[in-house]
Amino acid sequence: MSDNEVEYKLVDQNELETSITNKANQKLIEKDAELDEKRLGKATKELNNVIKKISILEFKLSNSRTKISERKIIQNDLNWIKENELIPRQQDVNDIKSRLKQSVRDLNSKEKKLSISTDRLPDESEKDYLIRIGKITAFGSAIAFQSEDSAEGLQNHQNLRTPGFVATTEVSDDDYDYDKQELDDTVANERNIDDGDELLYQNRLKKWVNKRSQLRQIDDHSDKEEWFKPLPTIKDAKLDESFKLPGDIYPSLFDYQKTCVQWLWELYSQKTGGIIGDEMGLGKTIQIISFIAGLHYSGLLDKPVLIVVPATVLNQWVNEFHKWWPPLRCVILHSIGSGMIKSEISEEKLEEYLETNESKSSFKGIKSQINAKEIVDRVMEKGHVLVTTYVGLRIYSKYILPRQWGYVVLDEGHKIRNPDSEISLTCKQIKTVNRIILSGTPIQNNLIELWSLFDFVFPGRLGTLPVFQQQFSIPINTGGYANSNNLQVKTAYKCAVILRDLISPYLLRRLKSDVAQDLPKKNEMVLFVKLTKIQQDLYEKFLSSEDLDSILKGKRNVLMGVDVLRKICNHPDLLYREALMHKKNYGNPNKSGKMLVLKNLLQIWQSQQHKTLLFCQTRQMLDILEKFVANLSLLDDENQKFNYLRMDGSTPIGKRQGLVDSFNNNLQIHVFLLTTKVGGLGVNLTGADRVIIFDPDWNPSTDIQARERAWRLGQKKDITIYRLMTTGTIEEKIYHRQIFKTFLTNKILKDPKQRRFFKNNELHDLFTLGDQNETGTETGDLFNNGHEEKFSGTKERKSTSLMKMKFKNDDDFYKVSSIAGVSKLDKFQDGEDEEENKNDENRLMAGIFSNSGVHSTLKHDEIIDSKNQEVNLIEQEADKLANEAAKALKKSRLLTRKNEIGTPTWTGKFGSAGKFGTKRRKIDNKNNSSSSILQNLKQKNELQDNNEMPELLNRKKTVEALVDFLLEQNDHFSKSNDIIKNSNIKMANEQDMVLVRSMLREIADWDGVKKGWKLKQSFIE
């Protein structure tokens, strides 16, 4: 194969995704069945032992030689064993057999295929079904708006009805010719200009009032302002005596959007918030604006609204407010806002600011602060909507946080998913009970992130984070471990059911496939491209390098290797960018397999009058693509080049909406170059009908966001999406993880039984390369996909892992400890169960649960080790544990709700709402020297050591003993057996064993070659 030729394989994305998700679902069912088979064998063995014990006692009881006095004792023992040992073991066996039968039914059921359907799904309740298709709210209420309007007419998800006075559908871009002056983003017009300039707002409002009032022949409401009067041509839609939507808005909403507005009113009436988790492209922005407009029209908006958004969509929000309900004053608190660019600040205001603030800022910074304060003051005084960014919220927090707000909305609210981040804590200090999050991807990784989102919209609903982790997160995760017992499996399920019931009324999520079936067809394809000779040589060179050897030994960060391989897959020049970027041949498309395919795609699509969005992950690659597109000739005229636009993180915020409008409206612009995170976030790019995702992202929601820019409400053309992927490389591995993660994230929202995240390969398996001459792909092999269309290849496919067992960081401490006489548990025995448990944990840590906070081995073992506890009935015990979780949550919630709104909830690190114990006494700096403060801290630490684990080893003394022992050894090295025998540390039980090993791993490194422990350098020094 020459450098300018490339081979590729074409796979339908929908068929591939359906196949993979079905296979993943099947794998999960099979895995659960396999684990239950093992549990059944163990439970049956325990049951047989109890039966033998009963038989022996019954034999003694029936023996004529047994004394009468002994018979009574034996009978009591017999009754106790039957009640406390026999019945629970029988229940265990019955439960596990029942689950196995269900697994068989699931595997044999064709209905369990995860195909999208608007029909009621298996095991789906009628309520869940009606919520899913947008017919009822999350609280179970049907649409209750009373309206005589039947003006929906020809409205569908392609032809949208414009809100306002006349019932018309939006004019197609194809029906209007734009001249250059109109497309110039520097032209001053009402679009993309906020209401920070009061004069502009008053002029805009006056125009709207005049136009609307002219439709009214007889004015029956002359004493009211125009924005409180009904539209003459279309009557109001009333929900109840308090809330109504004007005729300007209601007919332009689809049924599922009307349901959402009603749900928002239900939340508002309860003085709580919620999460609008609708799939991207269904109009989350419109739904929230319609509700805010309804509040204003109903005379209920007595305090201003705060909208926090990503910077790219600031102007888009303003435009939508102006379009849907013009009376609302909508002001941007950002450098692009008209209120922030005043040319003059009076001397008096400058002096007043300097008198009341200790500022070391530049004059420009002071000017910005003064303007920001004036904007907030004016919005608080006159209304109505303040729009700012997450960064702006933090910068201007001293003007925003002390005020009372009527409503707050976080667009792309998953930005606060880390409960301890500064932006999360800042958002949770906003003073209002009416809090809404908009997010098409409400769950991205784990339950801790879900807690953080819910703690914002409904503080205290899920208690404090430590209580939530103990009562929900840990039991649910524990129930998914390979060696979890029947009690833990059932407890996990019951906790998951309680959690689902707690959150479901406050999380509204609908999909396009359920509520917008008349959208244009979406055809999504995955294009597997082979590496060029240059790429393959560099890829193989890295796989055999010392750098990779260091990564696999744990001496270098894995992500460094991932970054190198991803650069090679995109374009090999990225590896040596600094040295090559100024050379003429930098970014030569013949070096990149994907760019050779890209050339053909762009030229063919342009010749067919298609407009294309081209997404990639980094600006460095976008530089190469821009140079490539700028020099690309049209297919039908080699003298003409492609017209394109570009937008990335370096594009000024104020110009971004202008670029979006230009691309959507100008047919002469062929390609829009975008980075996935900037161009893929909340932007409406329905002017395009072709999308190319040049390289996959670890987070599937990032690529989905990019895809949804074109396939959304208002799109009139069929959409084709191509994902470019290099065969057998790290990109294919990333794609596999995307599919699994998306599947399981959706599943966990619906299915409480889903506790475990399936991972087929370890992180180290990323470092493989399939033979470029083999037929098919690893994706096709893994999932037995029959929809792969193969274009090339002469050899049967195989893949070799470079992961060597000798590099595994697996010490022998538990094994040696058990030999040395420490009591051991099944989970520490050598064998399949231990390996399965270890792999499962590694997958959880390396995968989506890695950011949830690491629990110590001791804590984990304390939770999962319940096999020796005597229980009455497993069912009753599981109920008891689940009820205890609910009670603990209620107690935590009560403590949290006692705090004023705007007080961040206790996360274990930050916040104070719901925290147990008394408040800390402030340290008086005048009466406390540094030495006395240190002494107090030392005493506090000693008290904690003494109080937290009275039955376990003294942690401080144990660590000191281990360090002292290793310091005395040659080369500060010792084997596990010598440490246990000679360090004077007594381990009485398995908890001590886990604790000592954890300490040892903190102070020393395991040497897999010498089979021993080497003291870390920091302790030697």
Image (cartoon, grey):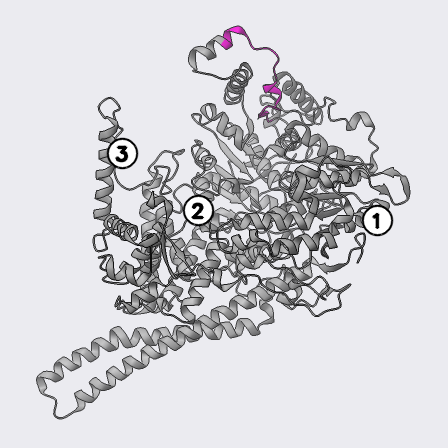
**Amino acid type assigned to the residue bearing label 3 in the image:** Arg
Q: CA distance from mark 2 to mark 3?
A: 26 Å
Q: Earlier in the sequence, mark 3 or mark 1?
A: 1
Q: Earlier in the sequence, mark 2 or mark 1?
A: 2
**Amino acid type assigned to the residue bearing label 1 in the image:** Ile
Q: Is residue 676 left or right of residue 587?
A: left
Q: Which structural element holds mark 1? A: helix
**Amino acid type assigned to the residue bearing label 2 in the image:** Trp
The spot of residue 253 in percent (x, y) is: 64, 42
Rendered image quadrant of residue 190: top right
Q: Which mark, residue 920?
A: 3
> Is the C-beta separation of discs 2 and 1 under 8 Å?
no
Q: CA distance from mark 2 to mark 1?
A: 48 Å
Crowding near the residue tagged with mark 2, few <14, some 14–19, many ≥20 C-alpha atoms within 10 Å: many
Label 2, on which residue? Answer: 451
Q: Which structural element holds mark 2? A: helix
Q: Is residue 306 visible?
A: no
Q: Is residue 330 magenta?
A: yes
Label 1, on which residue? Answer: 604
